[in-house]
Image (spheres, rainbow, N blue to C red):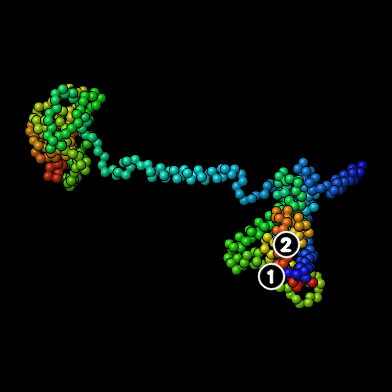
Amino acid sequence: MNNKDLNTNERESDSISQLLGSLRRVEAPNDFDFRVRSRIAKGRPVDGKANWLPVAVRYAMPLVLLVLIGGYFGFNSFYQPEDANVPVIAEVKPTIAPRIIETVSQPEPEVPQNDIATLQPPVTKSADVTEKPLVKKPLRSLSVPGSKNERPGGGSYDAAIRPSINLTPLGQDQNSNVDELPQMTGKASRPTSTEFLRSIGIKANSAGPGGRILSVRGAAANAGARVGDVIESLNIEGRSLWIRRDGRSVEIVIN
Amino acid sequence: MALDKIESLDTEGLSTSMSKNKLSDHALIEATRGGDEDAFGEIMARYRNPITNYIYRFLNDYEEAVDLAQETFVRVYFALDRYHTQFAFSTYIYRIATNLAISEIRKRKRRRLMSLTGLFQGEDDKTVEFQPPDTRILPDAELVEDERNEVIERAISALPEKYRAPVILRDVEGKSYDEVAAIMELGLGTTKSRISRGRALLKEKLQHYLQ
């Protein structure tokens, strides 16, 4: 670019400058001052941002919310109780409380290894532990066999899954004579299920629901109980029991 | 007696007003900080027209220019405590006005992008359609002048944002290069370069009016 071009450019630049400078100037309206003062009276201009919050709080609030929400879900996903996912099929209530017996000083008798049902933990004397009667009551719909309310068959799931454990006093053989009751020196006033069954002349492989009657004599035989009946429930105070026979529930009342 | 009193008050007001006219910008700012509202009125009297004209040339919209000029003074008023007197007040107020005008241009861009009609328009910097001047001979000189002004305004509006502000400050408002550099917060070389580049762009569009 030579000097001539430079001069031309400068001239044109000056011309542009003069052209722009020749534009008519606009002026502010007459009420300009008044409007400015009214704006000032209204207060500070609004920037559209939440300036009333400190910067730290503005960033900390969403962060704390995120942490709380994340922590909640994280805790729930990583910490779960062991039985949280186990579906509740049936509520199993213990029908036989630990027996109250004196500590036996004699050596324990041999337990047949192949009969798991007879295994039982050693029970020591405790004055606080009391026996509870069988709380299961017969369903009203099962009252009379052959009636309209007769249950069509089956049995309780509770009874089906219950292991057939014959609870006998420590040192007492399961197959011993039912009349040979062990000496009970505990403070319990009500008889246990086993004692009740023995007192009415029933020997069963289990004193609880699901127990099958192995032998019957005495009052139970007179009331109609038979070998092979399956015990459904006991009413110790009412001296009666519900049994299942041929798919039907039958109440046997001991006189 | 009462008339004398009124006359004396008028004289006092006049003398006060005249004394304020002689005060520098910094002195007026100090007086405003001290609670003298008249001092701020004097500041407005000095700068309302230049600022309105400057923003108008920037936006080519009078109503918006007046609104932003008022907003400029409101911001100045509320920021008086933060103003440092080592800088020229004119530089300070022009910088605020420039920032507001640029913000408005960017808002318009966003609005145009979001509107369906904006799909048929281009960017603000390049899309203000420049129409060549009508070369027909007009009988009325005033009409010619009006048309020329309109063409120049459109040409300025078509300038990219970074060239527009320095060119207006230099050629329309008559600021020195140093003042323009201070207002734009740019180096002197960059400022001169942008002004030169802006003039070159204008020259292409206003060739018809150059002699």
Dots 2, 1 in contact, CB < 8 A: no
The one nearer the camera, B36 or A236, is B36
In this picture, residue A232 sits left or right of residue B81: left
Q: Label 2: which residue?
A: B195
Q: Is residue B115 left or right of residue A82?
A: right
Q: Secondary structure at mark 1?
A: loop
Looking at the image, is mark 2 or mark 1 nearer the viewer? 2
What residue appears at the point 17 percent right and 47 percent down from the top-left corner? A152
**Residue position for label 1:** B130
Q: Is residue B113 visible?
A: yes
Between B176 and A210, which is closer to the camera in this rendering?
B176
Residue sitting at x 14%, y 40%: A230
Looking at the image, the residue that sits furthest to the bottom is B136
Categorize mark 2 by other alpha carbons within 10 Å: few (<14), some (14-19), many (20+).
many
Query: Residue lying furthest front in this view?
Result: A2
On the rendered image, what quadrant is the C terminus of chain A found in? top left
When the figure is inspected, residue A121 is found, relative to residue A20, above or below; the finding is above
Q: Residue at x 73, y 69 (%)?
A: A1
Q: What is the number of callouts on the image?
A: 2
Mark 2 residue type? Ile
Chain of the residue under the numbered disc 1 shown in the image: B
The tag earlier along the polypeptide, 2 or 1, is 1
Q: Residue at x 53, y 44 (%)?
A: A61
Task: Say above or below: B31 vs A217.
Answer: below
